[in-house]
Amino acid sequence: MVALNRAIAIGESRGPHAGLAALDQLAAEPQLASYHYLPAARAEFLRRLHRTEEARLAYQEARLLADNPVEQDFLTRRLDEPDS
């Protein structure tokens, strides 16, 4: 969890490319394999880079992993938003 927060902080401070690189290093961590915040964070950085299709896939993965209906609704809305 701490490593995920650190990777997100890297992306916020150094930009989405750096954030994606940090998140990709965590992808093989067993503790994060089914944690929906990892693909949700990836989706956000991908969206910021205008990598729309990859972002959509990551949002879909996050939505499938999320078990909270409020978070699922949020992810669905993000999935349906046009690029910004």
Image (spheres, grey):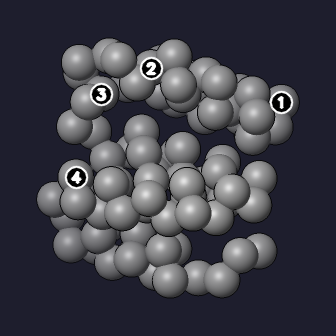
Mark 4 or 1: in front is 4
Residue 32 is labelled as: 3
Q: Residue at x 66, y 48 (%)?
A: 45
Report the Cα–Cα distance between label 3 and label 2: 7 Å
Q: Position of residue 49 (x, y in %)?
A: 77, 53
The residue labelled by disc 4 is 65
Circles 3, 2 touching at the beta carbon (< 8 Å): yes
Specify the amino acid type for callout 2: Leu
Report the Cα–Cα distance between label 4 and label 3: 11 Å
Q: Secondary structure at mark 1?
A: helix
**Which quarter of the figure has residue 74?**
bottom left
Q: Position of residue 29 (x, y in %)?
A: 32, 16
Q: Can residue 9 be seen?
A: no
> Is residue 27 shown above or below 42?
above
The residue labelled by disc 1 is 14
Q: How many other residues sit within 10 Å of disc 1, few (<14), some (14-19) or many (≥20)?
A: few
Closer to the N terminus: mark 4 or mark 1?
1
Closer to the N terminus: mark 1 or mark 3?
1
The residue labelled by disc 2 is 26
Circles 4, 3 touching at the beta carbon (< 8 Å): no
Mark 1 or 2: in front is 2
Q: On the rendered image, what quadrant is the C terminus found in?
A: bottom right
**Which quarter of the figure has residue 69?**
bottom left
Q: How many other residues sit within 10 Å of disc 2, few (<14), some (14-19) or many (≥20)?
A: some
Specify the amino acid type for callout 3: Leu
> Is residue 15 shown above or below 2?
below
